[in-house]
Image (cartoon, rainbow, N blue to C red):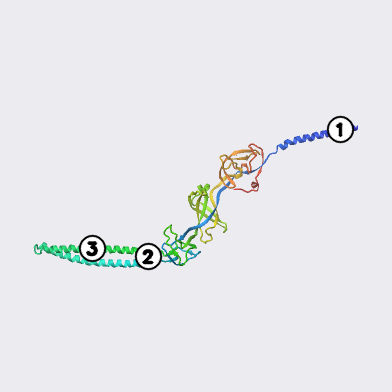
Amino acid sequence: MALRRRLLALVTLTTGAACLLTSCHQATPVAALDVPSVPVAAVEPATLTNDLVLTAEFVPYQDVDVMAKVAGYVKNIRVDIGDHVRQGDLLATLEVPELQDEMAKANAGVAAAQANVVTARGAIQRAQAEANITHLSFQRIQDVLTKEPGLVPRQEVDVAQSRDLEAAAQLAGAQSALNAALQTKSQAESELSRTSAMLQYASIRAPFAGVITKRYANTGSMIQAGISSQTQAMPVVRLAENSLLRLMLPVPVNAVAEIHDGQPVDVNVVTLGRTIEGKITRYADSLQASTRTMETEVDVPNPDDKLVPGMYAEVHLHLADHPNVLSVPVDAIDGLGSSVQHAYVVRGNELHLVSVTVGLQTPTRVEILSGLSSGDQVVVGRHSGLSDGEKVDAHPASYEANGTSRS
Protein backbone atom coordinates (compact mmCIF):
# COMPACT_ATOMS: atom_id res chain seq x y z
CA MET A 1 0.00 0.00 0.00
CA ALA A 2 2.81 2.38 0.84
CA LEU A 3 4.57 1.47 -2.38
CA ARG A 4 1.42 2.29 -4.33
CA ARG A 5 1.22 5.71 -2.71
CA ARG A 6 4.82 6.43 -3.58
CA LEU A 7 4.24 5.52 -7.22
CA LEU A 8 1.18 7.76 -7.35
CA ALA A 9 3.13 10.72 -5.93
CA LEU A 10 5.93 10.15 -8.46
CA VAL A 11 3.45 10.12 -11.33
CA THR A 12 1.92 13.35 -10.01
CA LEU A 13 5.31 15.11 -9.84
CA THR A 14 6.21 13.92 -13.32
CA THR A 15 2.95 15.18 -14.72
CA GLY A 16 3.42 18.60 -13.02
CA ALA A 17 6.93 18.95 -14.39
CA ALA A 18 5.72 18.12 -17.86
CA CYS A 19 3.00 20.71 -17.63
CA LEU A 20 5.48 23.31 -16.42
CA LEU A 21 7.81 22.61 -19.32
CA THR A 22 4.90 22.77 -21.74
CA SER A 23 3.90 26.20 -20.40
CA CYS A 24 7.42 27.53 -20.83
CA HIS A 25 7.56 26.38 -24.42
CA GLN A 26 4.22 28.03 -25.12
CA ALA A 27 5.41 31.45 -23.62
CA THR A 28 8.36 31.77 -25.97
CA PRO A 29 6.30 32.50 -29.14
CA VAL A 30 4.29 35.13 -27.24
CA ALA A 31 7.49 37.02 -26.36
CA ALA A 32 8.63 36.78 -29.97
CA LEU A 33 5.51 38.61 -31.03
CA ASP A 34 6.53 41.89 -29.19
CA VAL A 35 6.49 44.88 -31.63
CA PRO A 36 8.64 48.09 -31.42
CA SER A 37 7.02 51.23 -30.04
CA VAL A 38 7.45 54.34 -32.25
CA PRO A 39 6.47 58.01 -31.70
CA VAL A 40 4.31 59.52 -34.41
CA ALA A 41 3.08 62.98 -35.39
CA ALA A 42 0.21 64.02 -37.62
CA VAL A 43 0.59 65.66 -41.01
CA GLU A 44 -1.28 68.93 -40.53
CA PRO A 45 -1.60 72.44 -42.01
CA ALA A 46 0.62 75.15 -40.55
CA THR A 47 2.00 78.58 -41.41
CA LEU A 48 5.73 78.31 -42.00
CA THR A 49 8.00 81.30 -41.81
CA ASN A 50 11.65 81.20 -42.77
CA ASP A 51 13.59 83.78 -40.75
CA LEU A 52 17.31 84.39 -40.88
CA VAL A 53 18.87 85.83 -37.72
CA LEU A 54 22.00 87.91 -38.30
CA THR A 55 24.20 90.00 -36.06
CA ALA A 56 24.66 93.50 -37.44
CA GLU A 57 26.40 96.71 -36.41
CA PHE A 58 25.13 100.29 -36.45
CA VAL A 59 27.30 102.82 -38.31
CA PRO A 60 26.70 106.53 -39.01
CA TYR A 61 24.78 107.38 -42.15
CA GLN A 62 27.62 109.77 -43.04
CA ASP A 63 31.01 109.95 -41.36
CA VAL A 64 33.77 112.26 -42.63
CA ASP A 65 36.97 113.97 -41.59
CA VAL A 66 36.42 117.69 -42.19
CA MET A 67 39.51 119.03 -43.99
CA ALA A 68 40.68 122.57 -44.78
CA LYS A 69 40.94 123.60 -48.43
CA VAL A 70 43.49 126.31 -47.64
CA ALA A 71 46.56 126.16 -45.42
CA GLY A 72 46.73 128.32 -42.33
CA TYR A 73 46.83 128.54 -38.56
CA VAL A 74 43.75 127.81 -36.46
CA LYS A 75 42.58 131.19 -35.23
CA ASN A 76 39.77 129.66 -33.17
CA ILE A 77 37.85 126.39 -32.99
CA ARG A 78 34.28 126.50 -31.78
CA VAL A 79 33.38 122.81 -31.30
CA ASP A 80 34.53 119.81 -29.31
CA ILE A 81 33.73 116.10 -28.99
CA GLY A 82 30.01 115.46 -28.51
CA ASP A 83 28.83 118.82 -29.82
CA HIS A 84 25.82 118.67 -32.12
CA VAL A 85 25.97 121.00 -35.11
CA ARG A 86 23.66 121.93 -37.94
CA GLN A 87 24.54 122.10 -41.60
CA GLY A 88 26.52 125.28 -42.31
CA ASP A 89 27.48 125.93 -38.68
CA LEU A 90 30.95 127.46 -38.21
CA LEU A 91 33.38 124.88 -36.84
CA ALA A 92 36.71 126.73 -36.97
CA THR A 93 38.39 129.80 -38.45
CA LEU A 94 41.87 129.83 -40.01
CA GLU A 95 44.31 132.74 -40.11
CA VAL A 96 45.63 133.05 -43.70
CA PRO A 97 47.60 136.35 -44.15
CA GLU A 98 48.56 135.49 -47.73
CA LEU A 99 44.94 135.33 -48.81
CA GLN A 100 44.19 138.63 -47.13
CA ASP A 101 47.03 140.26 -49.11
CA GLU A 102 45.76 138.66 -52.30
CA MET A 103 42.30 140.00 -51.50
CA ALA A 104 43.65 143.56 -51.17
CA LYS A 105 45.57 143.16 -54.42
CA ALA A 106 42.48 141.84 -56.22
CA ASN A 107 40.40 144.77 -54.98
CA ALA A 108 43.05 147.21 -56.25
CA GLY A 109 43.10 145.44 -59.61
CA VAL A 110 39.34 145.78 -59.97
CA ALA A 111 39.51 149.49 -59.06
CA ALA A 112 42.27 150.12 -61.65
CA ALA A 113 40.35 148.23 -64.30
CA GLN A 114 37.23 150.29 -63.58
CA ALA A 115 39.28 153.50 -63.94
CA ASN A 116 40.65 152.31 -67.28
CA VAL A 117 37.12 151.62 -68.46
CA VAL A 118 36.08 155.16 -67.53
CA THR A 119 39.11 156.59 -69.37
CA ALA A 120 38.36 154.49 -72.43
CA ARG A 121 34.75 155.62 -72.46
CA GLY A 122 35.92 159.27 -72.34
CA ALA A 123 38.32 158.62 -75.21
CA ILE A 124 35.46 157.20 -77.24
CA GLN A 125 33.36 160.27 -76.62
CA ARG A 126 36.19 162.54 -77.82
CA ALA A 127 36.88 160.36 -80.83
CA GLN A 128 33.20 160.30 -81.65
CA ALA A 129 32.95 164.09 -81.52
CA GLU A 130 36.07 164.48 -83.68
CA ALA A 131 34.73 161.95 -86.17
CA ASN A 132 31.39 163.75 -86.36
CA ILE A 133 32.90 167.21 -87.11
CA THR A 134 35.42 165.95 -89.67
CA HIS A 135 32.77 163.90 -91.43
CA LEU A 136 30.42 166.91 -91.50
CA SER A 137 33.18 169.14 -92.98
CA PHE A 138 33.94 166.56 -95.66
CA GLN A 139 30.24 166.16 -96.46
CA ARG A 140 29.79 169.94 -96.92
CA ILE A 141 32.78 170.25 -99.25
CA GLN A 142 31.54 167.26 -101.18
CA ASP A 143 28.08 168.83 -101.57
CA VAL A 144 29.59 172.12 -102.86
CA LEU A 145 31.75 170.20 -105.31
CA THR A 146 28.68 168.36 -106.56
CA LYS A 147 26.59 171.52 -107.02
CA GLU A 148 29.30 173.81 -108.38
CA PRO A 149 32.16 171.83 -109.91
CA GLY A 150 35.46 173.70 -109.92
CA LEU A 151 34.52 176.07 -107.12
CA VAL A 152 36.47 174.09 -104.48
CA PRO A 153 40.01 172.89 -105.26
CA ARG A 154 40.35 169.16 -105.50
CA GLN A 155 43.13 169.16 -102.95
CA GLU A 156 40.84 170.56 -100.24
CA VAL A 157 38.35 167.83 -100.96
CA ASP A 158 41.08 165.17 -100.62
CA VAL A 159 42.34 166.67 -97.35
CA ALA A 160 38.82 166.75 -95.89
CA GLN A 161 38.26 163.15 -96.90
CA SER A 162 41.56 162.11 -95.35
CA ARG A 163 40.68 163.79 -92.06
CA ASP A 164 37.29 162.08 -92.08
CA LEU A 165 38.90 158.65 -92.52
CA GLU A 166 41.48 159.41 -89.81
CA ALA A 167 38.77 160.40 -87.31
CA ALA A 168 36.82 157.21 -88.04
CA ALA A 169 40.00 155.18 -87.43
CA GLN A 170 40.60 156.96 -84.15
CA LEU A 171 37.01 156.20 -83.09
CA ALA A 172 37.52 152.52 -83.89
CA GLY A 173 40.78 152.53 -81.92
CA ALA A 174 39.03 154.08 -78.92
CA GLN A 175 36.32 151.43 -79.13
CA SER A 176 38.97 148.67 -79.15
CA ALA A 177 40.67 150.28 -76.14
CA LEU A 178 37.32 150.24 -74.29
CA ASN A 179 36.82 146.56 -75.11
CA ALA A 180 40.30 145.79 -73.82
CA ALA A 181 39.59 147.75 -70.63
CA LEU A 182 36.36 145.83 -70.14
CA GLN A 183 38.20 142.50 -70.57
CA THR A 184 40.80 143.58 -68.03
CA LYS A 185 38.05 144.54 -65.63
CA SER A 186 36.39 141.13 -66.10
CA GLN A 187 39.69 139.37 -65.35
CA ALA A 188 40.24 141.51 -62.28
CA GLU A 189 36.74 140.76 -61.02
CA SER A 190 37.27 137.04 -61.64
CA GLU A 191 40.50 137.13 -59.63
CA LEU A 192 38.69 138.98 -56.86
CA SER A 193 35.93 136.37 -56.87
CA ARG A 194 38.48 133.52 -56.72
CA THR A 195 40.39 135.13 -53.88
CA SER A 196 37.16 135.84 -52.02
CA ALA A 197 36.09 132.21 -52.42
CA MET A 198 39.45 130.96 -51.15
CA LEU A 199 39.24 133.34 -48.21
CA GLN A 200 35.80 131.92 -47.38
CA TYR A 201 37.43 128.49 -47.05
CA ALA A 202 39.28 129.91 -44.07
CA SER A 203 35.93 129.58 -42.29
CA ILE A 204 35.39 125.83 -41.96
CA ARG A 205 31.70 124.91 -41.78
CA ALA A 206 29.75 121.72 -41.19
CA PRO A 207 28.88 119.97 -44.48
CA PHE A 208 25.84 118.31 -42.85
CA ALA A 209 24.05 118.13 -39.50
CA GLY A 210 25.68 115.74 -37.07
CA VAL A 211 27.80 115.26 -33.98
CA ILE A 212 31.53 115.89 -33.52
CA THR A 213 33.14 112.53 -32.77
CA LYS A 214 36.79 113.64 -32.80
CA ARG A 215 38.74 116.88 -32.60
CA TYR A 216 42.17 116.86 -34.21
CA ALA A 217 43.25 120.52 -34.02
CA ASN A 218 43.52 123.22 -31.38
CA THR A 219 44.00 126.99 -31.48
CA GLY A 220 47.34 127.74 -33.15
CA SER A 221 47.61 124.41 -34.97
CA MET A 222 49.06 124.56 -38.46
CA ILE A 223 46.60 123.06 -40.94
CA GLN A 224 47.69 122.05 -44.41
CA ALA A 225 45.41 122.24 -47.39
CA GLY A 226 43.70 118.89 -47.84
CA ILE A 227 43.40 119.05 -51.61
CA SER A 228 45.33 115.89 -52.55
CA SER A 229 45.12 112.29 -51.41
CA GLN A 230 48.92 112.13 -51.34
CA THR A 231 49.29 114.82 -48.68
CA GLN A 232 49.38 114.06 -44.97
CA ALA A 233 47.08 116.95 -44.13
CA MET A 234 45.58 116.90 -40.65
CA PRO A 235 41.78 117.14 -40.45
CA VAL A 236 40.17 119.70 -38.19
CA VAL A 237 37.35 117.54 -36.76
CA ARG A 238 35.46 114.33 -37.52
CA LEU A 239 31.73 114.69 -38.12
CA ALA A 240 29.16 111.87 -38.05
CA GLU A 241 25.47 111.94 -38.94
CA ASN A 242 23.79 109.89 -36.21
CA SER A 243 20.19 111.00 -36.57
CA LEU A 244 19.95 108.32 -39.25
CA LEU A 245 22.04 105.15 -38.93
CA ARG A 246 23.00 102.39 -41.31
CA LEU A 247 22.65 98.80 -40.09
CA MET A 248 25.16 96.63 -41.95
CA LEU A 249 23.99 93.02 -42.54
CA PRO A 250 26.37 90.30 -43.78
CA VAL A 251 23.84 88.14 -45.66
CA PRO A 252 25.23 84.64 -46.37
CA VAL A 253 25.41 83.32 -49.89
CA ASN A 254 22.55 80.83 -49.45
CA ALA A 255 20.09 83.66 -48.67
CA VAL A 256 21.26 86.21 -51.26
CA ALA A 257 18.63 85.20 -53.81
CA GLU A 258 15.84 86.08 -51.35
CA ILE A 259 17.01 89.66 -50.71
CA HIS A 260 15.13 92.59 -52.28
CA ASP A 261 14.53 96.28 -51.59
CA GLY A 262 11.81 97.01 -49.07
CA GLN A 263 12.02 93.57 -47.47
CA PRO A 264 10.82 93.80 -43.82
CA VAL A 265 13.19 93.08 -40.95
CA ASP A 266 12.91 93.14 -37.16
CA VAL A 267 15.84 94.79 -35.41
CA ASN A 268 16.32 93.66 -31.82
CA VAL A 269 18.71 95.93 -29.90
CA VAL A 270 19.46 93.70 -26.93
CA THR A 271 21.38 96.31 -24.92
CA LEU A 272 18.40 98.70 -25.01
CA GLY A 273 15.63 96.11 -24.92
CA ARG A 274 14.11 97.60 -28.07
CA THR A 275 12.72 96.00 -31.21
CA ILE A 276 12.53 98.20 -34.29
CA GLU A 277 10.68 97.42 -37.51
CA GLY A 278 12.69 98.26 -40.60
CA LYS A 279 13.11 97.54 -44.29
CA ILE A 280 16.09 96.69 -46.46
CA THR A 281 17.18 99.94 -48.09
CA ARG A 282 20.04 98.83 -50.32
CA TYR A 283 22.36 95.91 -50.98
CA ALA A 284 25.65 95.46 -52.82
CA ASP A 285 24.40 92.80 -55.26
CA SER A 286 27.89 91.33 -55.04
CA LEU A 287 29.55 88.83 -52.71
CA GLN A 288 32.69 89.54 -50.72
CA ALA A 289 35.19 86.86 -51.70
CA SER A 290 36.70 86.58 -48.21
CA THR A 291 33.44 85.97 -46.31
CA ARG A 292 31.02 84.81 -49.05
CA THR A 293 28.49 87.33 -47.77
CA MET A 294 26.67 90.24 -49.40
CA GLU A 295 26.72 93.64 -47.73
CA THR A 296 23.13 94.70 -47.08
CA GLU A 297 21.93 97.88 -45.37
CA VAL A 298 18.90 98.93 -43.37
CA ASP A 299 18.35 102.64 -42.61
CA VAL A 300 17.27 103.10 -38.99
CA PRO A 301 16.02 106.55 -37.82
CA ASN A 302 17.57 107.67 -34.54
CA PRO A 303 15.79 110.90 -33.55
CA ASP A 304 16.41 110.50 -29.81
CA ASP A 305 20.09 109.50 -30.20
CA LYS A 306 19.53 106.39 -28.09
CA LEU A 307 21.22 104.24 -30.70
CA VAL A 308 24.98 104.71 -30.82
CA PRO A 309 27.21 103.73 -33.75
CA GLY A 310 29.11 100.58 -32.89
CA MET A 311 26.16 98.95 -31.12
CA TYR A 312 25.21 95.46 -32.24
CA ALA A 313 21.71 94.24 -32.99
CA GLU A 314 20.03 90.96 -33.86
CA VAL A 315 18.28 91.27 -37.18
CA HIS A 316 15.44 88.87 -38.02
CA LEU A 317 15.26 88.80 -41.79
CA HIS A 318 11.96 87.46 -43.17
CA LEU A 319 12.88 85.36 -46.19
CA ALA A 320 9.61 83.54 -46.91
CA ASP A 321 6.06 83.05 -45.55
CA HIS A 322 4.00 79.99 -46.58
CA PRO A 323 0.57 80.13 -44.88
CA ASN A 324 -1.66 77.06 -44.34
CA VAL A 325 0.59 74.42 -45.94
CA LEU A 326 0.92 70.73 -45.07
CA SER A 327 3.88 70.20 -42.79
CA VAL A 328 5.55 67.68 -40.50
CA PRO A 329 8.34 67.91 -37.94
CA VAL A 330 11.79 68.04 -39.47
CA ASP A 331 12.83 64.75 -37.86
CA ALA A 332 10.03 62.92 -39.69
CA ILE A 333 11.85 63.15 -43.03
CA ASP A 334 14.91 61.09 -43.93
CA GLY A 335 17.36 62.43 -46.52
CA LEU A 336 16.54 66.16 -46.25
CA GLY A 337 18.61 68.08 -48.74
CA SER A 338 19.32 65.03 -50.89
CA SER A 339 17.70 63.76 -54.07
CA VAL A 340 15.83 60.96 -52.23
CA GLN A 341 13.61 61.92 -49.31
CA HIS A 342 11.15 59.66 -47.56
CA ALA A 343 9.08 59.17 -44.41
CA TYR A 344 7.56 56.26 -42.52
CA VAL A 345 3.74 56.34 -42.35
CA VAL A 346 1.87 54.18 -39.85
CA ARG A 347 -1.34 52.65 -41.24
CA GLY A 348 -3.10 49.95 -39.27
CA ASN A 349 -0.07 49.45 -36.99
CA GLU A 350 2.09 48.77 -40.02
CA LEU A 351 4.96 50.86 -41.40
CA HIS A 352 4.88 52.10 -44.99
CA LEU A 353 7.93 53.79 -46.54
CA VAL A 354 6.73 56.76 -48.63
CA SER A 355 8.76 59.05 -50.93
CA VAL A 356 8.02 62.72 -50.34
CA THR A 357 8.78 66.09 -51.89
CA VAL A 358 9.46 68.95 -49.50
CA GLY A 359 9.32 72.72 -49.80
CA LEU A 360 10.11 75.42 -47.27
CA GLN A 361 12.10 74.22 -44.28
CA THR A 362 12.19 75.97 -40.90
CA PRO A 363 14.26 74.97 -37.87
CA THR A 364 11.40 72.74 -36.59
CA ARG A 365 9.06 71.90 -39.48
CA VAL A 366 9.18 71.21 -43.18
CA GLU A 367 6.57 71.79 -45.88
CA ILE A 368 5.20 68.71 -47.67
CA LEU A 369 4.53 69.21 -51.37
CA SER A 370 3.68 65.62 -52.27
CA GLY A 371 3.66 62.08 -50.85
CA LEU A 372 1.62 62.68 -47.69
CA SER A 373 -1.94 63.71 -46.89
CA SER A 374 -3.42 65.68 -44.03
CA GLY A 375 -3.96 63.44 -41.01
CA ASP A 376 -1.30 60.85 -41.91
CA GLN A 377 0.69 59.59 -38.92
CA VAL A 378 4.43 59.75 -39.58
CA VAL A 379 7.21 58.35 -37.44
CA VAL A 380 9.41 61.04 -35.87
CA GLY A 381 12.84 60.76 -34.34
CA ARG A 382 15.37 58.06 -35.23
CA HIS A 383 14.38 55.69 -38.01
CA SER A 384 17.24 53.23 -37.69
CA GLY A 385 16.10 49.62 -37.40
CA LEU A 386 12.72 50.26 -39.02
CA SER A 387 11.66 48.57 -42.23
CA ASP A 388 8.80 48.78 -44.68
CA GLY A 389 5.85 46.56 -43.73
CA GLU A 390 6.99 46.08 -40.13
CA LYS A 391 4.39 45.91 -37.36
CA VAL A 392 4.75 48.69 -34.80
CA ASP A 393 3.05 50.08 -31.73
CA ALA A 394 2.46 53.80 -32.52
CA HIS A 395 1.99 56.43 -29.85
CA PRO A 396 1.86 60.25 -30.12
CA ALA A 397 5.18 62.05 -29.78
CA SER A 398 5.68 64.03 -26.59
CA TYR A 399 4.98 67.42 -28.19
CA GLU A 400 1.91 66.02 -29.94
CA ALA A 401 0.62 64.53 -26.68
CA ASN A 402 1.09 67.87 -24.96
CA GLY A 403 -0.83 69.65 -27.67
CA THR A 404 2.12 71.83 -28.71
CA SER A 405 3.10 72.61 -32.27
CA ARG A 406 6.60 73.17 -33.57
CA SER A 407 5.95 75.52 -36.50
Q: Which mark is residue 173?
A: 3
Alpha-carbon neighbours of circle 1 within 10 Å: few (<14), some, or many (≥20)?
A: few
The answer, for residue 329, to whether it is visible in the render is no
Mark pair 3, 1: CA separation: 168 Å
Which numbered circle lies on residue 196?
2
Q: Nearer the viewer, residue 167 or 140?
A: 167
Q: Mark 2 touching mark 1, by CB under 8 A?
A: no
Extreme residue toward the right, this view = 1
Residue 300 coordinates in the image, percent (x, y): 51, 57
Q: Which residue is mark 1?
A: 8
Q: Secondary structure at mark 2?
A: helix
Residue drawn 33% across and 68% down? Answer: 108
For the residues carrying marks 3 and 1, which lies nearer the camera in this image?
3
Corner quadrant of residue 374: top right
Q: Nearer the viewer, residue 267 or 62?
A: 62
Q: Measure the alpha-carbon separation of dots 2 and 3.
A: 34 Å
**Location of residue 310 with respect to 388 vertically, above or below:** below
In the rendered image, residue 210, in percent from the top left (x then y), is placed at 48, 62
Whether tag 3 and tag 1 are in contact, CB under 8 A, the answer is no
| Residue furthest out toward the left | 150
Q: Are marks 2 and 3 in contact (CB under 8 Å)?
A: no
